[in-house]
Amino acid sequence: MSSTSSVDFSSVPVLDYSLINTPEGKLQFLDQLRHALINVGFLYLTNHPVSQTDIDSLIGYIPKLFALPEDAKEIIRMANSEHFLGYSRFGAELTKGAVDQREQFDFATRHVSRYMKGDPDHYRLWGPSQWPDEKLIPGFREVLESYLDQVQELSYKFSSLISESFGLGPDGLSQFYEAPELMQHRSKIVQYPVVEGSSDQGVGPHYDAGFLTFLLQASSHRGLQVQNLSGQWIDAPPIPGTFVINLGKALEFITGGLARATSHRVLSPKGDTPRYSVPFFQNIGLDTRLTDHVLAFPPEILAPKEKRGTVVATDSVNFTEFDKEPSGKVNLIGRVKSHPDVAERHYPELFKQIFPNGFSGKGSAY
Ligand SMILES: O=C(O)CCC(=O)C(=O)O
Ligand SMILES: [Fe+2]
């Protein structure tokens, strides 16, 4: 990347959600949002509507979750789940061939699977989470479900604000979502331990593949970094009371590159305590094919894109046809590649198509 743009960023902007409560404030918010979407692809959101009491309670549970006895974690391991939900041991994922030094639980918003015999395989991708034994961590499930309900609601409101900031009215992105009961969004609770040795890769550089990500930085460690247009890594340290919001490749694609998906990574923490984070990945409808929904924008909205210059080519999507296949299938193929052991068990046909010679022991998480 060699682009030097006058609008290149050296910090991630902070947007105040409470501005939207007055008409002038809302206009100001939409201007700042449009700038962040086009030039940065990342922002902090402060004064958001998710209950701080619930966030604090969730943050309090996280060390206890990772401290559960090994057998209590293994009993909900992801390999059990055709929905790719559950526990992944330290080092189970790779980004571009290198081990991500993190341990995690994948959970998702409440959902009853729509899958019926004869439906496409990707309808099986969404379904219920695996929960740790309530007796071992009483109250955790209730807090996390309430938290996910609230972030889900925020994610729809935020998507509507994005649409407004691009001059498309509040419902310009509604076509990407089905009725609430037919949608599911995914989240992870992640622990990045202090590591010895040469690698400091918490998660290697990647783009998020989906639509919108809402990240809760759940401890005070630095480590998250965002790549600007000239290729420098810019710190995005935790700011209490905020979410870090970023765009995925699907949203970038349907805006024709107007909104940016931005490369980011996490460095392993220094010191003596682990870093914790909780990303929430907002999905689009399982059947949505991106090529059918590319958006058109008024010229005044497109102008700042010219000033910014081009965005580097996509290298994070899972296969070249990602824009022509239903989003559920794109996601499923991504999961098969990042978790071949789970796929071999639950999607043997697809596993064979993707790994005709079996799994070589190296996967790719993104
Ligand atoms: O843990 C973080 O702060 C970010 C994680 C991330 O980028 C991801 O899981 O996609
Ligand atoms: Fe990410």
Image (cartoon, rainbow, N blue to C red):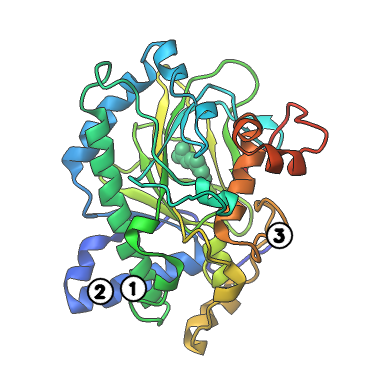
Q: Amino acid at mark 2?
A: Lys
Q: Is residue 262 visible?
A: no
Earlier in the chain: of badge 3 and badge 2, it is 3
| Gap between marks 3 and 1 measured at Cα | 30 Å
Q: Position of residue 94 (x, y in %)?
A: 64, 33
Looking at the picture, which amino acid does disc 1 mark?
A: Leu
Residue type for callout 3: Ser
Question: Where is the N terminus found, in terms of image quarters?
Answer: bottom right
The image position of residue 120, as x and y in percent, is 58, 54
Question: Of helix, strand and loop, which one carries label 3?
Answer: loop
Above or below — where is 301 with respect to 308?
below
The residue that label 1 is drawn on is 30
Q: In the rendered structure, are the residues bearing label 3 and label 2 in contact, judged by CB atoms less than 8 Å apart?
A: no
Disc 3 residue crowd, few under 14, some 14–19, many 20+, Cα 10 Å = few
Which of 88/78 is in front?
Answer: 78
- Mark 3 residue's CB less than 8 Å from ligand 2: no
Q: Which residue ends up furthest to the front in the rendered image?
A: 117
Residue occupying image coordinates x 34% and y 70%:
160
Which one is in front, 2 or 167? 167
Q: Which mark is residue 26?
A: 2
Q: Quadrant of residue 200?
A: top right
> Residue 277 falls in which quadrant of the image?
top left
Q: Are marks 1 and 2 in contact (CB under 8 Å)?
A: yes
Crowd rating for badge 1 (residues with CA inside 10 Å; few <14, some 14–19, many 20+):
many
Closer-to-camera residue (180/101):
180
Read off the residue under disc 3: 2
**Circle 2 — which element?**
helix
Question: In the figure, is residue 215 to the left or right of 94?
Answer: left
